[in-house]
Amino acid sequence: MSLLINLRHLARKGLELHGELSVEELDPGVADDMVRLPYPAHYDVFVERPSTAIVVHGRLEITIACVCVRCLKQFERRVVIEGWNCEVLPGDEETPVQNDCVDLTMRVREDILLALPQHPLCEPECPGLSPPQTPAHDSDAAFQGLDGGSVWTDLNKLKW
């Protein structure tokens, strides 16, 4: 259900709103393989209209699925935005008033996307992937072509 605010309900006093926005409503469009939004976002906000502007403040929360960029381990993390604020001014093109209602879904979506980790780590001190174990004889095989002579020997044989 979108975060739709009926302005008629704000005429007398502020409103407390609690609910969630589905993944489809958030329409994340995140083209990042490391961060996904498989769960709905939850909001707990207070809406008031002290003047002609609409002021919203409260808390946003969403659980995201991530892949650690160092070790490629999958994990989930809660993203919480405490003290979320939003102000809708009259004539705001991004959040137009339609039928005495304002839909703040896109504002919530934008702030959630800005709060997502750019470089998700499963732990702050994640060591990353361990280097592949190679037998000692394999590393020596790469140098068998070098007969102890100069590396320029074969190049010097070329005719110009």
Image: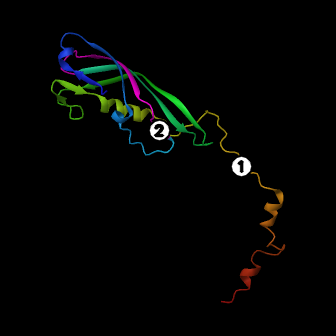
Q: Is-magenta flag for residue 38?
A: yes
Q: Residue furthest bottom?
A: 159
Quarter holding residue 67? top right
Q: Is-magenta flag for residue 158?
A: no
Judging depth in this view, the residue of 73 and 56 nearest the camera is 73
Q: At 57% across and 43% down in the image, what residue appears?
A: 69
**Where is residue 36 drawn, in percent x and y?**
47, 38
User: Which amino acid, mark 2?
Assistant: Arg
Judging depth in this view, the residue of 134 and 126 nearest the camera is 134
Q: Provide the secondary structure element on which disc 2 rests.
A: strand
Q: At 81% across and 70% down in the image, what residue appears?
A: 144
Q: Give the left or right position of residue 65, taking residue 84 as reference.
A: right
Query: Looking at the image, is mark 2 or mark 1 nearer the viewer?
Result: 2
Q: Which residue is mark 2?
A: 36
Where's the C terminus, which quadrant?
A: bottom right
The answer to whether residue 108 is above or below residue 159 is above
Q: Which residue is mark 1?
A: 131
Q: How many marks?
A: 2
Quarter holding residue 26? top left
**Where is residue 102 drawn, in percent x and y?**
22, 26
What colour scheme does the image use? Answer: rainbow
| Magenta span of residues | 35-53
Q: At 34% across and 29% down in the image, what residue appears?
A: 108
Q: Provide the secondary structure element on which disc 1 rests.
A: loop
**Where is residue 9 drawn, in percent x and y?**
20, 15
User: Which amino acid, mark 1?
Assistant: Pro
The answer to whether residue 77 is above or below residue 131 is above
Give the Cα distance between marks 2 and 1: 28 Å
Q: Residue furthest top?
A: 12
Q: Earlier in the sequence, mark 2 or mark 1?
A: 2
